[in-house]
Every structure is written in C-alpha cells, then in structure tokens.
Amino acid sequence: MGTQLTDRPEGQPPTDRVWSIETNGINPIPDSERHGKPLELFWIWCAANIGILGVTYGAFLVTFFGLSFFQSIVAALLGTILSFSLVGFISLAGKLGGAPTLVLSRASFGVIGNVIPTLISYISLVGWEIILVALSTLGAQAILERLGVGGGDATLGIAFGVIALATIAIGLLGHATIVKIQTWFTWAFAAMTLGFIALEIDRVDWDKVTSLPSGDFLGGFIGGMSIIMAGLGIGWVNAAADYSRYLPRETSSRAVVGWTVFGASVAPIVLILFGVLLAANDSSLANVLHPGELARPLPTWFLVPYLATAAGGLIAGAVLDIYSSGLNLLTLGVKLPRYQSVAIDGVLMLIGNIYLLFIAEESFLFSFIGFLVTLGVLLASWAAIFLVDMFMYRRRTGYAEADLYTARGRYGSGNVAGIASFLVASFVGLGLVNSGSPIFTWVGYLLRWFNLDEGALATSSIGILIAFGLAGILYALLSRLLSIETGVRAAEPARAPLR
C-alpha cells in the first residue's frame, strides 16, 4: 500500500521548502519526500482563477452568444464545474505516480510519442503566460497612471518589469513557495473582489438582465459553455498533476478531486455571473480585456487597491503556467535543472510581451478567443486519452515509475492507440470549430467542406466536446484491440489504488 503517513517525517523535505529553490525536477517524488494535505490544492487553484477574465467570459455569454440570464447561469455552472472536474481527476495521477503531468502522459502515448502532446502543452502554457502577464501589466500601468507616475511606454515598461520579475521569481522558487503565496493571494484577492462587486453592483440594470432574450441551443448555449470550458478547466488540464505529485499516496482521492474542483470553480462562477449582469447593460464589456478599462468607474480610493488585486490575480495564474511550462521543457528532453528551465520560459514570456505590449497595434481579443478554441480542441483530446488510460489501467496498480523515463520500458517508444486516437480526434475537432482571428483562419475546414460555416454549428465550438468524446472512445477501443496494455497490468506493483 506504500509508506504510511506515520512513517513520514513531519514538515517539508529539504528538496521542497518555502523560500528555497525546489531541487526536484521531473523525477518521481519518493515516498520519503511526500508531504502536504489536499486542502493545499484549494489555495493553489482558487488563487490562479480569481482573475478579471471571469467577468469578460460572462460578457461573452451575453454579447457574443446571446444567452438569457438563466441560460448564462447554467452555461457558467456546467462549463466551469465540468472542465475543472477534468483537472481534479487528472490530479489523481500526481499522487499515483509522483511525476509531472506530461511525464505521466508517457504511459498512454509512449516515451517518444508523448513528445507531440508535450509540445502542444508547452505552447499552451507559454501562450497563457504571455497573455496573463500582458493583462496584469496593463492593470499595473493603470495603477501608476492613476497615481500620477508618468505615462505611455515608460510607465508600461516599469509595470512590465515588476510583473515579469515577480512571476519569474516565484516560478523559480517552486512548489512549496507557490503553495504559500497562492494561499495569501486567495485571501487578499477574494476580499478585494467582493469589494469590487459591491461597488459595481449599481451598474447592473435588473430590468435588462431579466429581459435578455434566449439564445439558440447549439450556437448559443453550447458555444458559450465551450468557451467557458476552454478558457477555464481545459486550459489547466495539462498542469493538474504538477501540484498534486507531492501528496502522500494514501491521500483521499475524493479530497484531491473535491478541493481542486471547489477551489478552481468558486471564483470563476461568481465573476462570470457578475460579468453577465454588467454586460446586460453594457455590451462593450465583451470587448474589454484591459483591467483598467473594466474598473474605470470605481472611485480612486478603491480603484488602486482593486487594480493591484486584478493584476495580482493574473500573476497567480501566470505563476502556475511558468512553473508547469518549465517542467514541460524538461520532459521534452532539455537537460537543465528545473529552475533554469523556468528562466528559459521567462525569456520567451518577455519576448512575447514585448510584442503584445509595445509592437502589436491591433487588439488581441479575437486572437485570444482563437487561441482558446484551437488549443482547447488539442488539450481536450489529450485529456480524454489520459483519463481513459488512468481509469482503465492505472487506477488500481499505479504507474511503473522507472519505465516512464526510458523507451525500452513497458510503455515503449510509442503507443499506437494513444497517438492515433489523438490525431484523429484533433483532426475532427479542429475541423468543427471556427475563429475570427487571422492567426487561426485555417481551423473549421470540415465546416467549410460541407458548407456549414455560416450556421449555428460554426459558432458552437462543439469541436471541443466532440474531440474529447471521440478521443476517449477511440483510445478505449484501440488500446484493447491492439493489446497495447497486454502484460502491463499484471506486471505493475500493487500500490496506492485510487479510493
């Protein structure tokens, strides 16, 4: 059953202490270094999702998808809770195998075949880093301008330097420090967010809220729910096990899933619904990603601390992205200590932000939506395969940890079932989504081939849901049919089954 909690030394191991650089990389965490409680997952995921983007997603539901208040409530609840349930269940793999998410993914794709989803995951995480730091920088710039500190590119540069330095520094220190800081962030940002809602509630026109017309089911409700899922839980699935891998194997699985889903969902649901209320009276909010623009009506005495909260909430998400992207880089084969991989990701984040903040002339709103949808299809396909593999083959026997690091082990160089399922599901899913972004005009090819690119199906983003279902079904069938797992289950040590 594994080492019992009573045999484990109290406190944090030397490899993972607060305010010290975490020395573990992508190696499995040994039982002697497992520590912590599942409640930690609440703080980690809650802080990372108390972001101003929740209000924007709510505005999307009203303005872009034409949903009524009741439809928006249901879409917000389902999209948020279902997508973060994926994060919760994938977190179980962390305590089972003790390795980062994309290392554990080698069990369902093979050690070499897993390069494909790892590269996609890395691009997604770096992309999110860039977006969140850019938005946080705009919030910090608004603070400086309201305080009368300069203006223009100089102020933007100062704000960017502070935000980028904080994000990289926390990511460099690693897991234990992230848990501590995310706990502080949760308390501070939750209090300020409630204050923001209290001061902004007068902007809500309840007559307009109750008279919002109902949207159609496919293009409206499914489309809105799909965007919520892509922007929230699906965007985090590839990092889920990174923050549960230190937990003791005997930790309750229900607690791991429960605290993850509750912590990640509670703030976005509140913010999305508040965004719906505001957008009923001001549809222009759907085009606002700038934290300073959203909070402009606030009185100065509260605007400054709230913008600090808005900027900090985005930093909390960026910290998880830069930490996990560093682990992805190591999984791709880069031979560096973990903290140096984070530094590389920091450089990429700096380059991307220099372009977005100082060079790009157009708003990146539609590019952002296109990013969500396109990466959403790919990550949904991967998540389905990962989950089916875990529940079919790892749930009771765990992972053969040593074999995750060699192509000569039982997982081999490539798992045909995983690779084929991913490619087929991704091809179908990408063909059934659409994007107004010039960067992603190539998606939606199946819609165009069958002349369906003008109707409700084209705006539904249903390709995300289809890709998830198709990938899971294909993998369940192919892994049995091709006997990919023959002998694996019998050879695995019986340890720490999910309970």
Image: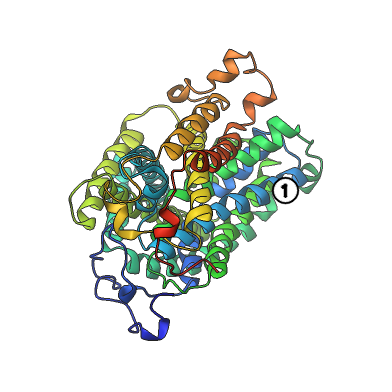
For disc 1, the marked residue is 74
Report the number of discs: 1
Residue at 27% x, 44% y is 332
Left or right? Give the position of 400 relative to 233.
Answer: left
Quarter of the picture holding the C terminus: bottom right
Closer to the camera in the image, 1 or 367 = 1
Residue reaching furthest to the bottom? 6
Closer to the camera in the image, 37 or 129 = 37
Left or right? Give the position of 209 relative to 479.
Answer: right
Give coordinates of residue 302: x percent, y percent: 52, 60
Closer to the camera in the image, 327 or 456 = 327
Closer to the camera in the image, 294 or 220 = 220
**Visible in this render: residue 147?**
no
Residue at 32% x, 48% y is 328
Give coordinates of residue 342: x percent, y percent: 26, 52
Disc 1 secondary structure class: helix
Left or right? Give the position of 350 relative to 286.
Answer: left
Give coordinates of residue 207: x percent, y percent: 81, 45
Q: Amino acid at mark 1?
A: Val
Identify the coloring.
rainbow
Quarter of the picture holding the N terminus: bottom left
Within 10 angstroms of label 1, few (less than 14), some, or many (20 or more) residues?
A: some
Residue at 35% x, 35% y is 356
Give coordinates of residue 368: x percent, y percent: 47, 35
**96 is higher (above) or lower (below) than 331:** below
**470 is higher (above) or lower (below) than 163:** above
**Visible in this render: residue 313?**
yes
